[in-house]
Amino acid sequence: IDHYRTTTFPVGIHTFQSISSTNDYAKQFGSSQDFAVPQVFVADTQTKGHGRLGRHFYSPIKGGIYLSILIPLQNRRPIHSGLITTGTAVCVVRTLQQFFPDEDFRVKWVNDILVHDKKCGGILTETISSLEDGLHEDVVVGIGLNIDSAGFPDQISHKAGAIVASTTIDKNRIAAGIIDNFFYLYQTYTSGNFLEEYARLSETLGKRVQIVMGNQTITGLADHFTGDGALVVQQDSGVQVTVSSGEVTKVYL
Ligand code: BTN
């Protein structure tokens, strides 16, 4: 997909056979040059893929999709990171449902994509505080998906999930579908109009959760999402706490 035009508007596409991390590359790109339209970075493999909280994201094999979307924010309102992350999860699942209609995909708050109760993907949203005035923030949304587990070594396959054992579906088509769905949703994402769908896909709602935020731990029922994509937890004491994704270090189910 070297030359790609989304159904909604043009984007730049950069493809790599191997890269350290598409998110790192996109951040570097975004902080070193001006770009008028969003830029997408897609790699067959990554040597240093990472997830939230500095975790490693296993991605040295070709069975996955590793891509980052860099969004310029000059002259635009700042990104709403709670909504962009939940919205991206919805886009990813919509795409996967098109390609794998028999699978039941779920989303674990905030950004884990689950299949067969195992994590098969994640989303890492990072901001680049950039530019002279320090006001504009470009955003990088990174998406990692384990499509097939064919190349998984043993020590990975008992931790990480994949969607199928092997597939002949062209991963570029899935990547293109995700990019299309992303930019379609991006036009209206601040309305949060996808949040009902997000709630329907949620593995977390209605469950007992324990959320670690720095040195504070909250235990209770995952009750509902706010219009900002934050999670409201009904604590055992009856007190409700609203937790936004940025604060969380761990969610136990
Ligand atoms: C998570 O599970 O916490 C998020 C995982 C995000 C992984 C993707 S793969 C493409 C992009 N590049 C990275 O280094 N990370 C994201």
Image (cartoon, helix red, strand yellow):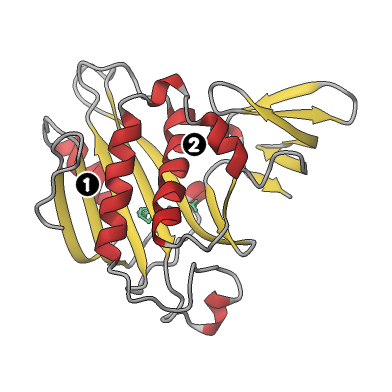
Q: What element carries label 2?
A: helix
Residue 212 x, y percent position in the rendering:
70, 40
Which amino acid, mark 2? Answer: Thr
Q: Is mark 1 on a helix, strand or loop?
A: strand
Within 10 Å of disc 1 (Cα), the crowding (few <14, some 14-19, many 20+) is many
Q: Does 206 sit above or below residue 155?
A: above
Q: Residue placed farthest to the front in the image?
A: 101
Q: At 55% from the left edge and 76% from the top edge, which residue is drawn?
A: 157
Quadrant housing residue 213: top right
Which amino acid, mark 1? Answer: Val
Q: Label 2 CB, ligand 1: below 8 Å?
A: no
User: To which residue does mark 2 refer?
Assistant: 86
Is any atom of residue 50 visible in this view? no
Residue 152 x, y percent position in the rendering:
46, 79
Quadrant where the N terminus sits is bottom left
State yes or no: discs 2 and 1 in contact (Cβ < 8 Å). Answer: no
**Mark 2 or 1, nearer chain start:** 1
What distance separates the C-alpha of mark 2 from that of mark 1?
19 Å
Q: At 46% from the left edge and 29% from the top edge, which residue is drawn?
A: 83
